[in-house]
Image (tube, coloured by chain):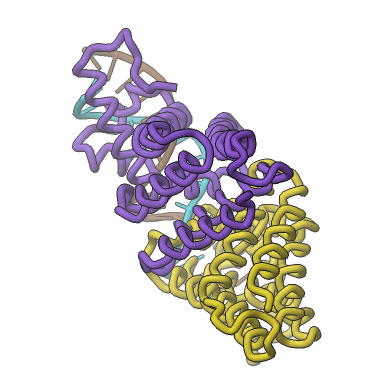
Chain colours: A yellow, B purple, C cyan, D brown
Amino acid sequence: MKTMIPGKTTRGQHTRMSILSKAMQLASKEGLEGLSIGRLSTGLNMSKSGLLAHFGSKEDLQLATVDLACDRYNDQIVQPALKSTKGITRLMSLCGFWLKYHEQDTLPGGCFFLAVSSEFDSRAGRVRKRIKFTMSRWLRLLKRELYHAQKAGEIQRDTDTEQIAFELNAIGHGANWAYQLYEDRGVFQKARHAIERTLQAIRS
Amino acid sequence: MKTMIPGKTTRGQHTRMSILSKAMQLASKEGLEGLSIGRLSTGLNMSKSGLLAHFGSKEDLQLATVDLACDRYNDQIVQPALKSTKGITRLMSLCGFWLKYHEQDTLPGGCFFLAVSSEFDSRAGRVRKRIKFTMSRWLRLLKRELYHAQKAGEIQRDTDTEQIAFELNAIGHGANWAYQLYEDRGVFQKARHAIERTLQAIRS
DNA sequence: CCTACCGATCGGTAGG
DNA sequence: CCTACCGATCGGTAGG
């Protein structure tokens, strides 16, 4: 899912990346549909057609933006957490990096994926599918670490990993939701408490 | 916060109500900004200007739609739950009606407030304020019942009601999020389990 | 509640 | 990567 295309020049790649980076930031605030090519290009001191030349259509721009966001979340949340030993430790590391990413205002409009999944959940098409696919991978990652924790005897053998993954994800999204609406960073601490309690309850 | 205006004729009120009802449904799918006056009026076999005559501006239409949604949630979730005795019973009743409301596909695009709060959380203005205000009332309602439960000795005396209200809300929103993306009604059962476990953990 | 209309902006294309 | 342009749609107004 890397967004770099090998055949392009370094110069073109750089422009393409700055477009997508800006698009990701704007989309966290206004969504992928609310983001207009006109405003995006103006913000980058480009012409609309110059920008579109990199992607062909708005839908392709949206898809590339989702992929870049996926890469960024991977680099800053998943990869760092993979350094921890698998199981409960890695699971808490994943949640910790996830919350920290948004607590530090990395994106101006909060969680990119919460924003765009809410926006596209009632639309048909490739963009919705890509978002859904990316979210599935995230949930599967949580479930996988719960599975490892289970096999290692860290949590109860009869734990419903699907259930706990749902809850952890809900807590994280709940924190992002509340933070965007109330601008109170305290909700991230609430989320950490909730995650701790949830995992404590299934500890063996 | 009732949306009826006393001075208007019955006929005008009826038209106004059918506009708002349709607007609420469309907004659950496309948001309050994505909802355009053109498409809304076409769907109601009206002219754009005929529709706008009821509200003056799109922002006023959006505000009235938020208020209608608030009334509807009140009628179908809060009022029914108020028949239960206060405390834990009423709290579970509130969550139950809330989940059932969305499990039964009452709105075509899922939870109205989840959709519009995600959409407006990065915009300034009156609409965002109204949504925020409505959400605050909902969270306060959850907290109030937790407080009653605490006073009645149903839950532990040192319970952080703000924390638990945050968690219950996160679980409900998490279910709506997952349902819209995966179209799997099973998430509502997951949410019920999570709520049950959360309340069980603080039981005295 | 309507028709007729306004300027602004939308995504996208032609041609370079 | 640009200028110049396309038809469609946006929110909103005038006047009835």
Q: Residue A79, position in %: x, y? A: 75, 82
Q: Which of A142 and A55 is in front in this view?
A: A142
Q: Nearer the viewer, residue B60 or A169?
A: A169
Q: Is residue A163 above or below residue A103?
A: below
Quarter of the image with the C terminus of chain A is bottom right
What residue appears at the point 54 percent right and 35 percent down from the top-left corner? Answer: B141
Q: In this view, does A74 lie above or below A120?
A: below
Q: In this view, does B26 lie to the left or right of B198?
A: left
Q: Which of B185 and A119 is in front in this view?
A: B185
What residue appears at the point 22 percent right and 38 percent down from the top-left corner? Answer: B44
Please indicate, yes or no, whether residue A56 appears anywhere in the rendered image. Answer: no
What residue appears at the point 67 percent right and 42 percent down from the top-left corner? Answer: B162
Q: Residue B101, position in %: x, y? A: 35, 48
Q: In this view, does A90 lie above or below B176?
A: below
Marker count (numbered): 0
Q: Residue A94, position in %: x, y? A: 72, 74
Q: Is residue B109 left or right of residue A26?
A: left
